[in-house]
Structure formats: structure tokens, C-alpha cells
Amino acid sequence: MTTSSPIRNLVLVLGDQLDHSSVLFDTFDPKQDLIWMAENNTEATHVWCHKIRLVLFFSAMRHFRDVQIDHGRNVRYHQLSDDPKKDKGIDFKELLQADLKELNPEKMRVVSPGDMKVEHLLKDAADEAGMELTFLEDTHFYVTKAMFSDHTKGRKTLIMEHFYREQRKRFDILVDDKGKPEGGSWNYDDQNREKFGKQGPGGLPSPPVFEPTSVTSVVIKLVEERFKDHPGKLDSFDWPVTREGALEALDDFIEHRLPKFGTYEDAMWQEEALLYHSRLSALMNLKLLNPRECVDAAVNAYHKGNAPLNSVEGFVRQILGWREFIRAIYHQEMPSYADRNALQCADRDVPTFFWDGETDMACVKDCMDSVIKTAWNHHIPRLMVLGQFSLLFGVHPYKFHEWHMAMYADAIDWVSLPNTLGMSQFGDGGIVGTKPYCASGNYINKMSNYCKGCRYNFKEAHGENACPFTTLYWDFLDRHQQAFTKNRRMVFQMKNLERKPDEELKKIRIQADGLREKIDSGVRI
Ligand code: SF4
């Protein structure tokens, strides 16, 4: 195809759709079709995006483009310039509109975007250009919109566990001929809450190091120059950015960390962010990895006797259960979901130390150090340390989602919003999770070694050494007493609150008010 040949399909590949087996290529004709990709300046700057997230997206996109060109496909690729003046003010929609005018394709085709805002933007651009736009079903996922719609029929509430079991049977994963779960149980959560003893995790397997490719090095330079004020560090960037790298990361996890993944799934340890986790979520969310190949690799490891059932089931549950459920909830509940704020007094900004990690709270500091260095934490630091602090402190749920979108390499709107606004911040009032995830500093002490070296005392709720988690936890229960008393899953916690003497509650309220005042005014705690 020459640049002057008429174009049949302008085939849009979005930054989180780097699927080498995409349904887009099933009918792609290099003689008539043109791939269109653009590095999104608006996306990079509308929230204060982590440098690693920017490098990961742009480098993976450029590698994907190069592979398509090697396959003989034509690509129009808009690359951000080192010099912001050259493309200043040109956003994604403007670029697309200009190209539609210039290229005048017959049609546009794209896989249904994961982000509903992007879907609307594309529809608007197509409408304004008077062009036909086809959204193709995203075959990357196991569960189609129609399957989820069937699942919801006749159900008053949606429970992830019910959804997950249905998918295990539907896709014949870890079930026998009669549809019974492998090992006799649908989940092995009771075996997956082990903590490390005083001696710590010991010798952990070293993950593979993915040195920056020449493409990545160019992008790192671009991001360092153009986005220098953004949070995060790039000096130890080691994310895989190609399909081959992603497969290597998967193989490494299956062989070296999956066997103990389940047992220590919820444990934390200072300066050991990865432990036995996979860090594959970002690669799946960019679609460099397919969830089926991740699930199949784990199940094969189990059948070969290389990984125990509790680990393999726990891993399968995260992908086939949570990941698919969360996506389905997003599509079902959006766009109004983004406006939900069930605990209406949650209206604060994220604390200043959520950007730079400068705090005396040892747990928050360590989790933030990992976010700044790697743009990643496993689910417990996100949910029970940083997410929980935000919930107890009273950050607006959508602001917490925006912060999460900015700071994590694996954050995409469809996955971040239900996980943050819903599960972590209880902003949806119980759609994703049936109770708020909240605990005192005692939980963090139980699951990690953070409290040992902390200047605060996890047992104290008021006074000079009081742990901010413990103070804010009791204050949180107290402030929402009326709402939580009606929640059957909160009975135990509310009974404990009732046992607190009035005098103590008074001191806790004063301490909590003081903390909020300090944090709101930017004082480090
Ligand atoms: Fe975190 Fe409180 Fe433990 Fe310090 S004492 S590490 S603030 S839970």
C-alpha cells in the first residue's frame, strides 16, 4: 500500500491493546489497511503520571509498532517528541481527527476500549468525521459481556465467588469430569495467609532483570526530559516491554515463585516488595500476555507436580475470578460508577506523602518506596496499607483511583476503578466487596515486620506514639457506626467498638481530628 492508495480500514491499536494475536489482525489486509497508534500526551499529563508507567507504555507501544512493520503491515505512529513545543496542545483526539481528514479511510476498526472515556472519545471522533466505526469484542478476556449478562440474570447481588466457580466449570479449569473442584475445595484461602516468622522470608528467588532495550533507553531519555516533574524514578527500570520479555517473566514466575506464591500471598516484608508475587498484571493489562496462557502455565505446573494446589488455585482465582469479575462490574456499572461515594464524608485529597513517601509510618514509607522505585506493590500493600490509610483518612474514592492510575504500572481505568473506588474505598457501598477493608495497626503488625522498627506503636490509639492506623481505624468505625451496624460482616468489629469506654473514644476522636488537620495542611506524620 502506498500512502496515496485508498485505505479500507484504519485499524486503531490503543496503548493497552498490544495483543499480537488481536482479533484486529484476523481480517487485516496489508494492501488496504493501515494500523494507527498514538502516544497519548493527554493521558500522560491529565494526571501526574509515574515515569515508569509512561516508559512502560511508550516503549511497549514502540516495540509493538516495530513488530507490525516487520510483519509487513503499514503503521502510522505518532510519537511524542523530545521537545514538547513541537507537539504541544495536540491531543489524542485531535491527532485522530487530523488523520481521518488526511487519510479518509472507508472505516475505522478498534477492539472495544477498556476505558469508557476512550470509547466515547472514539465515537465522537468518528461521528464528527461522518465515519463508520466498528468496535470488536475484546477476545483477550475469558468472559464476554453476554456471558456476564447471563450470570447477572435473577441475582440480587453479585458475589465474586459465585462468578468464579461458574467460570471454573465453564472453562474446565481445575475441575473434574463431574464439575467438582480439584482437591475437593473451590478455594484454599485458609492455607494462603501465612506470614514470615521472625527470621523473615530468607533467600528469595531473584527475578529476571530486563535491561532497557535501545528503544526503552530512548523513551527513558524522553520521559526524563519531558516529564521531569512527574513522580517515580527511572534509574532501575526493569520491566519487560516485548512479547518475548513478557513470556520470559511468566516462565520465571511459574518456575521460581509460584510454588510458594499461595502460602505467602498476603505477607509483607520490609524492602522485599516482590516476595513470591508475579508482577504479571501490567503485562496482562497491556495484553503482552494472554490470561489463558498464564492460567494454563500455572495449571500445568500443578499437574506436573511443580506447584501445590493452594498456590495454583490462588493464582487462577486472581485472573479468572477477580480480574474478569472486576472488568465485568466496570462495564455493567459505568459511567455512573465513577461518581459513587457511599461514605459521603470521604472528600479529601490523597496525603502529600502518597507522592514522595516522606512519612514516619514505616509501613507506608516502605510501600511508597516500592511504588516510587518500581510503580508496583502486591495486593496487600495496596489494599491494607495504602488503600486502607486512604479509606480511614477519608480520601475521596475517585481521587484515590486517580492517584492509583498515576502511580501503578498495571493501572488501567477498567481494573483500577472497581478495585480502588469499590473494593478498597467502599465507595460503591458494597458492589465489589461486601464490607469495607479496614483494620487497626494490629493487622499490619501480624502480616509484616514493619511495626518493629516504627516510631509509632500499633497497639496505641491515642497519645504521642499512637499508630495513625489504629487511631483512624477506631475513629472510622465510630464515625460510620450507624451504617456499619447494619452490615452483618461488620458485627464483630462493631461489637469491639461498643466495648470502648466513652472516655477513650473521646481521646481517639481528638487524636484523629489532629491527624487529619496535620495531613490536610501537608505536615508529615
Ligand atoms: Fe504502620 Fe502503625 Fe505499624 Fe507504624 S506502628 S508500621 S504506622 S501499622
Image: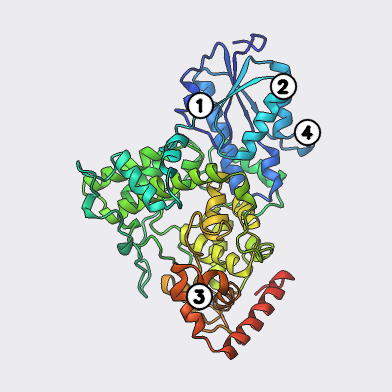
Which residue has dot 1 on it? 67
> Which amino acid does the dot numbered 3 rest on?
Ser
Helix, strand or loop for disc 2: helix
Helix, strand or loop for disc 1: helix
- Residue 491 location in percent, x, y? 45, 73
Which residue has dot 4 on it? 86
Please tell me which of labels 4 and 1 falls first in the chain: 1
In this rendered view, identify the residue nearer to me: 114 or 92: 114
Helix, strand or loop for disc 3: loop
Which residue has dot 2 on it? 129
103 displayed left or right of 299 = right
Could you tell me if the residues under marks 3 and 1 are in contact, i.e. CB atoms within 8 Å?
A: no
Please say if 314 is above or below 123.
Answer: below
Please say if 56 is above or below 363.
Answer: above
The span from disc 2 to disc 3 (Cα, nearest Å) is: 55 Å
Which residue has dot 3 on it? 440
- The quadrant of the rendering that contains the N terminus is top right
Q: Is mark 1 within 8 Å of ligand 1?
A: no
280 displayed left or right of 466 = left
